[in-house]
Amino acid sequence: MSKIVLGFSGGVDSAVSAKLLQKAGHQVYGLYLDNADRAAREDAVSAAEFIGIPLTVLDVKTELEEKVCRPFAESYLRGETPNPCIICNPGVKFKNLLAEAERIGAEHIATGHYARAEKGMIFKGMPANDQSYMLCRLTREQAGRCLFPLGGFEKKQVRAMAEEFHLPVAHKPDSMEICFIPDKDYIGWLSRRREMPPPGEFVFHGQVVGQHEGIHRYTVGQRRPGLLNERKVYISRIDPISNTIELALWEELFKTEVHARNFNWLTEPPEQPIRASVRVRHTKWENPPCTVWAEGSGVKILCDEPVRAPAAGQSAVLYDGDRLLGGGFIL
């Protein structure tokens, strides 16, 4: 019987993970990362008591602010499209899971992510709800200690298991929002933290075609309301220096060459070009084959088929078959 530290939110995924680990004969210790949400904290404590696992509550509000919230806000105001979960996983969540494992002498750490972990490597989960994309920046040490009990299941199966285990959270809704913006009001959250960018110009093929309300209100790939010359147009580039937003037609959004900075390899960085597949956003359907060149701390990716609207600040994530190779931030 081995000790395992489980990231425990009190939701259906972490609760079923706890039960599966218990059934496999492990000693499960829960760790709840507290962001000052009293109701969520009480839910986690109640669920842990019902399942019968000890739960440590760790205050991470200051750490989350420094490592996730502030960089998220700064990235948005640079005209980028950041993904806070990808930043949080290695810097806050898995970091603290590993620290807790060291504190109590646990061999492994676990979460309710829909991915698979085998022999220190991370693989895609079931296609319907694969979350391996979110794990692209884990350190090799973190990846090497991971267990993902839900990796072989789809969400509907996990819900069914929660009912079989008679868990009170079996029908608890999934949390779809960013944990530090629970009301989904990005603009309100940003405006309480920073001075907002002023209005500026929409530019289409070099010509000014209107006024935007501030670059923080738009993301690359988003459709601009209305028509231009009887055609739909989309955000193709956000320039915070000139405070302009470039528009493009749908077919102009697609790119075959993508560059990413600060690439995190979960393998040894290749000395020669390699073949892989790539995701440039957390989608299930865009995963084209590509050739990859390591360039300093970044990569150049040449896709066999164009990808839609690769957005600065999002992550370009590479795979070898189902195996996660790593990810970097799109330039």
Image (cartoon, rainbow, N blue to C red):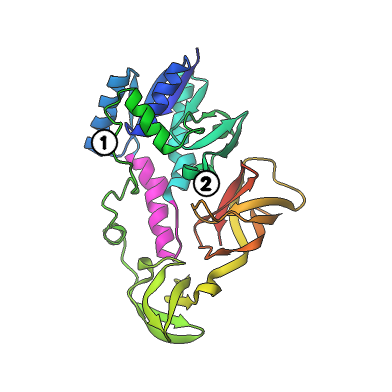
> In the rendered image, which quarter is residue 268 located in?
top right
Residue nearest the viewer, comparing 4 with 320: 320
Snapshot quadrant of residue 217 = bottom left
Left or right for 24, reference 294: left
Quick one: 2 or 25, which is closer to the camera? Answer: 25
Is residue 47 shown in magenta?
A: no
Indicate left or right for 45 with 85 as reference: left
Whole-angstrom CA distance, mark 2 to mark 1, is 25 Å
User: In this picture, which residue range is highlighted in magenta?
Assistant: 61-83
Image position, residue 73 (x, y; %): 38, 57
Return the disc, 2 or 1, that comes first in the chain's sequence.
Answer: 1
Residue 230 spot, x, y in % from top left:
42, 84
Q: Amino acid at mark 2?
A: Tyr
Callout 1 amino acid: Ala
| Residue in the picture at 51% in, 85% down | 206
Question: Taking the image as drawn, is residue 281 in sight?
Answer: yes
Looking at the rendered structure, the secondary structure element under dot 2 is: helix
Q: Mostly what secondary structure, the magenta segment? A: helix
Residue 267 against residue 224 in the figure, above or below: above
Assess whether residue 82 is covered by the magenta stretch.
yes
Mark 1, Cα crowd under 10 Å, few <14 / some 14-19 / many 20+, is: some
Q: Nearer the viewer, residue 79 or 160?
A: 160
Q: Which residue is mark 2?
A: 133
Q: At 22% from the left edge and 36% from the top edge, which residue is drawn? A: 39
Residue under numbered circle 1: 40
